[in-house]
Image: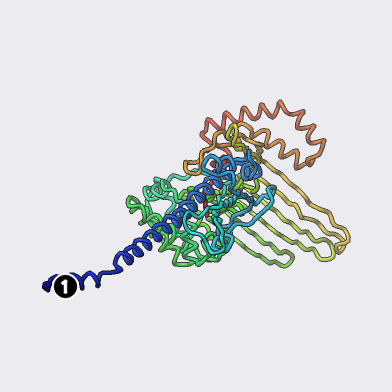
Amino acid sequence: MSSFATGLSCARIRRQSGAVAMLGALWLMIAVICLATIDVGNVFWQKRELQKIADLAALAGASGPLASSCSSNKSASAYLNASANGLLADDLLETAIGKWIASNSGNDNKGFEVAGAKSKEVNACKVNIKRNVPYLFIFFASGSEERTVSAAAIARQTPQLAKITARTTLLSLNTDDSILSPVLKGLLGTTVNINAIGWRGLANIDLDLLQYLNLLAAKLNVKAGDYTGLLDVNTNVGVLLGAMIELVQKDSTASAQVAVLEKIFAAVKVSPVSVKLSQLLNLGAGLNDTALDAKVNLLDLVSSSILLANSKNAANVDLGISLLIANVRLKLKVIEPPQWALGNPAVDVIQAKTAQIQLNTEASLIVPLVATVDLKLKLEVASGTAKVVGYSCNPSKYLNVDVGSGLLKVSTEGSSVKLLLGLISIPLNLKIPFEKNIPAHLFKDPPSMKNNQKWESFDMNFSIGTVLLDGIFDALLGQGVGSEILKDLLGSLKLLIDGILGLLITALGINLSQVDVGVQMNCGFQPSLVY
């Protein structure tokens, strides 16, 4: 007689039949998933390794002259760097030289355009690497045993960058007497009470030019990175000052400076003036955001902005006078702020010009049936120019700058006397340049854009005799051979006058027609990844 328990055990065994097969299938599926995961993970790992190699190779290619560094040649920096970081013998490495434009970074080419190595616009190195990665466990139905993995990188160069500033001194102002406040009243038509401490506070702050431009681009709805377009956008001085305030507010210790800026901002809003940013900033063409990573003195920007509100000058007079026989037009500009220019010395003309007084007069005098006199008089007082004419980064770092200091420039070019109803025209071309030119002055080891400018001063104290006599000779004899011979013959006399007058002027504490020139320069090929 069999028991109930025995029957129950047989039924349970019949219900559990096939469980081992199901369990085996489950484990097999898990194994396949694991193997596939390992296989896919290997592809991603290879992709990451290729991207690392491409990034480093692109940076190496942009770390020197693109023509020789950004190449798949086995001696080029890009290839050597890729080989040192894991490039395999079967990998395919391709390089391209071109220009990278920030405003086009959203297109299919990520802002990169192929260009010839000799083009002045090339600034980037592009690297593509392809590798065949074998399947470890899983094969496609086509029977292929490997797949192609690729990676691309773009690195751009920061070009050599030079900045020069020129300012001239006609007279000295004592800021302890708060003289700038009444000047502001005359400029803006309203009272702005700012003490000397406030002005010094502005002078002690440098703004990040790149942050300033990016903030203005956002405010003016200009495409990010399109700095050339930003310079041509019409805006007003209030917007320019408002952006300055917003940047300075980020510094928790600059509350006093913010208060000064807000006072000026309120005064400017009384009569807003439409301007272009290019009137405030003298930038070279084609500079990118890395190149514009420079500092600009806040007081210089504020004073230039205020003067923009009054046609860039502390006094600007434009008068037209009509008499019975004469028409006279007078344009007078007084006190121009320091001027600066920023650009790549390899391709840009970097020149700053300023003058403390500029007078342009046009007069037409008519004597019926006798003569017509057309007079064009141009006058500049305390002018200054600075122009970069050469540079070097290796083996020594320097800037060569042509410096000009003008005590007085008088010109009547374009003037004439017309007789017999215009049948006879007699030119009245007179040019008296009381100026001193210093060609290719060497500024050794100019500081980088992150540091303060290196300043040097030039005046006429010990060259006033030479300047005056040469100017008179040029006016009377022109700049011909006779004038040059006479200048040479009187060389000793000029030196004697220079010494006597120079000692006298210096003893009186006067710097005659002083020009201050400040320089900064970023050197070397500084690469950065952009894709």
Q: Amino acid at mark 1?
A: Leu
User: x, y (%) of residue 475?
Assistant: 75, 42
From the top left corner, tell me how far across and down residue 280 is, in percent: 54, 56
Q: Secondary structure at mark 1?
A: helix
In the depicted structure, whether residue 148 falls above or below residue 73: below
Looking at the rendering, which quadrant does residue 329 occupy?
bottom right
Residue closer to the observer: 271 or 117: 117
Confirm whether residue 294 shows in the render. Answer: yes
Residue 319 position, x and y percent, is: 62, 63
Residue at 62% across, 35% down? 441
The colour scheme applied to this rendered structure is: rainbow
- Mark yes or no: residue 226 visible: no
Given residues 38 and 282, the one toward you in this image is 38
The x, y position of residue 471, in whole percent, is 71, 39
Q: Quick check: 217 left or right of 260? A: right
Quadrant for residue 461, please give it: top right
Q: Residue 152 appears in which quarter of the rendering?
A: bottom right
| 127 horizontally vs 371: left or right | left
Which residue is identified by label 1?
Answer: 8
The quarter of the picture where the N terminus appears is: bottom left
As displayed, is residue 140 above or below residue 497?
below
Q: Nearer the viewer, residue 466 or 93?
A: 93
Q: Is residue 83 above or below residue 30?
A: above
Instruction: Give the residue at x 51% y 51%.
Output: 51
